[in-house]
Image (cartoon, rainbow, N blue to C red):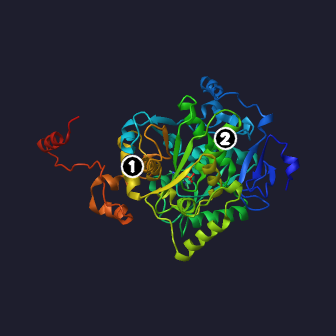
Amino acid sequence: MSTTTSVTTDLAYQQCINPDCRTTFPVRQVAFACPSCGDLIDVVYNWDRLPVPKSLKHFESKWSKRLDPLCFSGVWRFHELLPFAPSEMVVTIGEGQTLLQPANKLAEFVGQNPGRLYLQYEGMNPSGSFKDNGMTAAFTHARMVGAKRVACASTGNTSAALSVYCSATSYGFQAIIFIGSGKIAYGKLAQALDHGALTLQIIGDFDDAMARVKQVADRLNIYLMNSVNPFRLEGQKTIMYRVLEALGWEVPDWIVVPGGNLGNSSAFGKAFLELKHLGLIDRIPRLAVINAAGARTLDELVGRHHLTWNDGLPDAQITSGYYGSMDASGAKADTIASAIEINRPVNLKKCLRALDACNGVVRHVSDQEIMDAKAQVGAGGMGCEPASAASVAGAKRLREEGVIGPDERVVCILTAHQLKDPTATVAYHSGDPQQFEKVLGSRGIHRAEYSNKPFVVANDMEDIVRALLQNFGDS
Ligand code: F0G
């Protein structure tokens, strides 16, 4: 292993986040945990020796060079802010062409004043979720180190993204994915199968699959693509750069994001800490991380057990005690938002750092709140899958509590596309009681206040016209 003194002179290197350890090693070393103490790893830069732009406006010059894949990509046009790879090693499929959408109709539902709510729609990525932002960076690193077999455990979107990056590039990558049994939404499973991933369905849930894939990757020397991979998070930082870009480089008041494995929230915190350090922004927005009620480890640990970053030394006893009691009671994550059905978030510590840096808050929302918010998202603009709508449900909750002010500028992250999980959407809207009960009722969802029910009508001209006239509404 390399020592601290030899690699800290590199422009970029890897470093353990534990202040009592701080082991450093080169970018080209493959490790998904600190080789000394097993803690999480950061990618760290010697910014003083790197060509950092003086202003974020610098990135606007990339727009005129869209024929260059590194300027076209919504990740790599910010290459100077994730400078761990030479340009010729970058693996890109045109990710990050995403949209910050003003959401005035939804603002009313959330309780924000007009013009104060935005949706950052990451469903426009090639694989339909925010994961592509991270995959492009991790695949770039995999290419730099000559990896060929790449694996992840997934609730669906990571595996879909990984599969697309293997099938759509020509560097000889093989996709290996671990999924829990019966836990993955069909849209996502369809992607992995269609793109030719070697798919292992573990008899267990995501937390089981995650624990296994780490062991297997270690034993068979497979490159791990979950968000414990610090290069994934480097790519996900750019979601925040694009939000700033769309706001004319103004910092919003709040970023609201669903929390599952806590990669996004961790990446966002790192992005803002670095931008502030570099003098590219003058303040950091507040961060709200929203769990589903049935998978609310972060909210329990932070809200109830007062776990904090504590300068890099969060009280490990709080976490182990919580996991111990979860194991003793046989508790398993359970939510309609299957993407965030996770009880042991691997990036917990980094998320605590982000919450500390961003004066953050954590909440959980019920499956009912998630599905209602999702219907409102769909009615007011781009659609999303249930997990994504947790951000909107969370913003509404924080607004009701008065934590978010009505005039504050709020950006909710819509993490993935509506078509990822059509089962949940159709069950909510269809009005079919059996379907409703099977998919939603069993999860404590009893109302579909915002449903848009299809009408059944005989194949008869008069009946059809009557049905339409009765249901046109006033608009
Ligand atoms: N939203 C969606 C649509 C997701 O797929 C995920 C995570 C999250 C939110 C949570 O993000 O982990 O950064 O806190 N999905 C992972 C997967 C776990 O396997 O696809 P996070």
Nearer the observer, 253 or 54: 253
Residue 373, labelled with which disc? 1
Does 65 sit above or below residue 362?
above
Disc 2 residue type (three-letter): Val
Residue at the outermost bottom position: 328
1 sits to left or right of 82: right
Does 347 sit above or below residue 114?
below
Residue at the outermost front position: 402
Q: How many labels sit on residues?
A: 2
Residue drawn at point x = 36 percent, y = 48 percent: 375
Residue drawn at point x = 77 percent, y = 51 percent: 15
Disc 2 residue: CB within 8 Å of ligand 1: no
Q: Position of residue 149 (x, y in %)?
A: 68, 55
Disc 1 residue type (three-letter): Ala
Does 353 sit above or below residue 80?
below
Question: Distance between the Cα atoms at labels 2 and 1?
Answer: 35 Å
The disc, 2 or 1, on the residue closer to the chain's N-terminal end is 2
Residue 91, labelled with which disc? 2
Does 258 sit above or below residue 67?
below
Which quadrant of the figure has residue 448?
bottom left
